Image: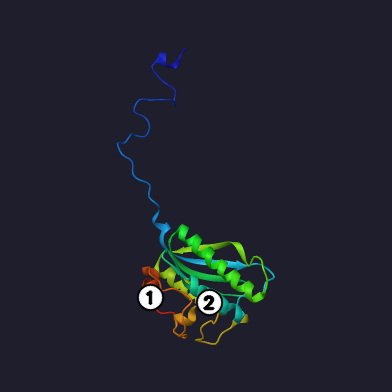
């Protein structure tokens, strides 16, 4: 005997009035706010068995390259630090596409500059890099401090108290250099002024 003949129906199946209510309009798709106007901390690693990025000639060549490519309308390199086998960047990007394109452009510049000094060809930077979005003044403050003082973490690069790392953009950040900077002036509030809520950064 069919269940409907007894006046009841099993669970499931079509029922009048069930399901999501129809609407007369649709909300347009919007990109998430986190994908726009972001400040990012980027870390990239050098391939194994290569010389150090901190050699003075390599640093000089990379800085010359950064001067020609640290700024575009949708992307800016604001801080950097070169370590023996990795590098840190603090950048501004208008969206995730601009971030990817801008970072890869900088890493290509690093590779070409280093290879020119080392007189070699081939890959310098690992294919993948890590990036973290900095979404608050505190995060930006900590990132700037971490990047510009990163050499202090490595005992082999121990610097004197108050000395800016010569393989970083700290020399311009603390006003120790008068030559043309290899970094861009920030435009977004977080990197331009927001981080200052948490105090100054001492080399």
Which residue is painted at 47% across and 75% down in the image? 145
Comparing 2 with 94, the one in front is 94
Q: Position of residue 33 (x, y in %)?
A: 39, 56
Secondary structure, mark 1, is: helix
Q: Is residue 154 visible?
A: no
Please give the residue where the numbered disc 2 appears in the rendered image: 64
* Residue 108 higher or lower than 173, as above or below: above
Closer-to-camera residue (179/171): 179
Are there few (<14), some (14-19), or many (20+) residues within 10 Å of tag 1? Answer: some
Residue hosting label 1: 196
* Front one among 123 and 130: 123
Which residue reaches farthest top?
A: 1
**Vertical relation: 203 (above or below) 193:** below
Q: In this image, 161 relative to 36: left or right?
A: right
Callout 1–callout 2 Cβ contact below 8 Å: no
Residue 157 seen from this side: yes
Residue at horizontal 49 percent and vertical 70 percent from the top: 69
Image coordinates for residue 201, horizontal then vertical, percent: 44, 79
| Few, some or many residues within 10 Å of mark 2 (<14, 14–19, 20+) | some
Q: Position of residue 82 (x, y in %)?
A: 56, 75
> Which residue appears at 59% of the width and 73% of the height?
113
């Amino acid at each position: 005997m069919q269940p409907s003949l007894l006046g009841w129906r099993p669970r499931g199946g079509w029922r009048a009035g069930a399901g999501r209510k129809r609407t007369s309009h649709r909300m347009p798709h919007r990109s998430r706010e986190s994908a726009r106007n972001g400040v990012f901390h980027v870390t990239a690693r050098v391939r194994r068995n290569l010389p150090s990025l901190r050699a003075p000639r390599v640093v000089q060549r990379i800085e010359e390259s950064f001067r020609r490519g640290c700024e575009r309308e949708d992307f800016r390199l604001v801080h950097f630090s070169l370590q023996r086998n990795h590098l840190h960047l603090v950048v501004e990007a208008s969206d995730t596409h601009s971030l990817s394109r801008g970072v890869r452009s900088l890493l290509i510049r690093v590779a070409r500059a280093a290879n020119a000094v080392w007189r070699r060809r081939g890959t310098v930077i690992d294919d993948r890099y890590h990036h973290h979005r900095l979404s608050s003044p505190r995060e930006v403050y900590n990132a700037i401090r971490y990047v510009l003082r990163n050499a202090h973490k490595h005992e082999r690069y121990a610097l004197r108290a108050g000395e800016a790392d010569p393989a970083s953009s700290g020399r311009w950040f603390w006003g120790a250099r008068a030559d043309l900077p290899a970094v861009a002036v920030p435009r977004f509030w977080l990197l331009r002024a927001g981080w200052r809520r948490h105090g100054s950064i001492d080399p």
